[in-house]
Image (cartoon, rainbow, N blue to C red):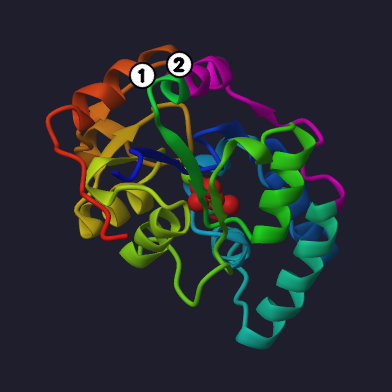
Amino acid sequence: MSLPPIVVFDLDGTLAETAPDIMRTLNVILEQEGLAALPLERARELVGAGARALIERGFKVSGRPLDTEKLEQLFETFLGIYADGVAGTSFIHDGVGAALDELAAEGFVFAVCTNKPIRHTRLFLDHFGLSGRFAAIAGRDSFAFCKPDPRHLTETIAQAGADPARAVMVGDSRTDVDTARAAGIAVICVPFGYTDVPVEALAPDLVIQHFSELPQAVRQLTDRKPALATHS
Ligand SMILES: O=C(O)COP(=O)(O)O
Ligand SMILES: [Mg+2]
């Protein structure tokens, strides 16, 4: 018996457009602190490394210093506000469901590996009725490490009970490409997420323009690798 092949998805900017709700939450915090709200376009450079980094980056571009204690306090505030509006105007990208159906029919299993806190990740996926589609869901606080640490990805794959030799990561940022490379796992990028450089510059194995291209891209990257035999 062999372990199933797997596609591991990043969440923010990859499976879903979540920036409006994330930026709205950040802006509540900035305004509470007497700073100007930032436009949605800034999401490409601000989102991608988790909520703490988002707040730090938001203060930095606003020219306001932020000490560790204050950051922790604002982070707690962020968690509460965002939990109440995690799926306000966010949406799942077109073609995700059909791509999962097609790959599932070929024996693939799926997981989510995101730097979003696990609480928000579950709230979000539950809202869209997607939680049941993933064999494992790992947020930034699910383990003692998170992307770009490759163990966030490899432990997610292990938790899903899948074959790391036939695994593909799908992401939108340098963090995802760095994580996959460090784990020795193939990586596909989508160009519609949150990155300050074009994804082509990150040199992923493949770039897809739409989720309708995902099944073919995944086949291309997993086909020639033999399945690892299990020892049980
Ligand atoms: O919320 C973030 O900053 C990052 O989340 P992601 O890992 O799903 O892109
Ligand atoms: Mg992302």
- In the displayed structure, would residue 215 be above or below residue 111? above
Q: Quadrant of the C terminus?
A: bottom left
Disc 2 residue type (three-letter): Glu
Provide the secondary structure element on which disc 2 rests: helix
The local crowd at label 1, few if under 14, some if 14 to 19, many if 20 or more residues have their Cα within 10 Å, is some
Instruction: Pick whichever, 200 or 145, lies toward us.
Output: 145
Q: Residue at x 54, y 46 (%)?
A: 135
Instruction: Pick whichever, 12 or 154, lies toward us.
Output: 154
Q: Is residue 118 left or right of residue 225?
A: right
Disc 1 residue type (three-letter): Pro
Q: Is residue 89 magenta?
A: yes
Q: Residue 26, percent across and down?
A: 72, 54
Instruction: Pick whichever, 219 or 200, lies toward us.
Output: 219
Q: Quadrant of the N terminus?
A: top left
Q: Residue 164, percent across and down?
A: 28, 50
Q: Is residue 197 magenta?
A: no
Q: Is residue 83 left or right of residue 107?
A: right
Report whether residue 46 is seen: no
Mark 2 close to ligand 2, CB under 8 Å: no
Q: Residue at x 36, y 19 (%)?
A: 215
**Magenta residues, as a range?**
84-102
- In the displayed structure, would residue 180 be above or below residue 101? below
Q: Is residue 61 left or right of residue 186?
A: right
Report whether residue 23 is seen: yes
The local crowd at label 2, few if under 14, some if 14 to 19, many if 20 or more residues have their Cα within 10 Å, is some
Residue bearing the label numbered 2? 102
Residue bearing the label numbered 1? 215
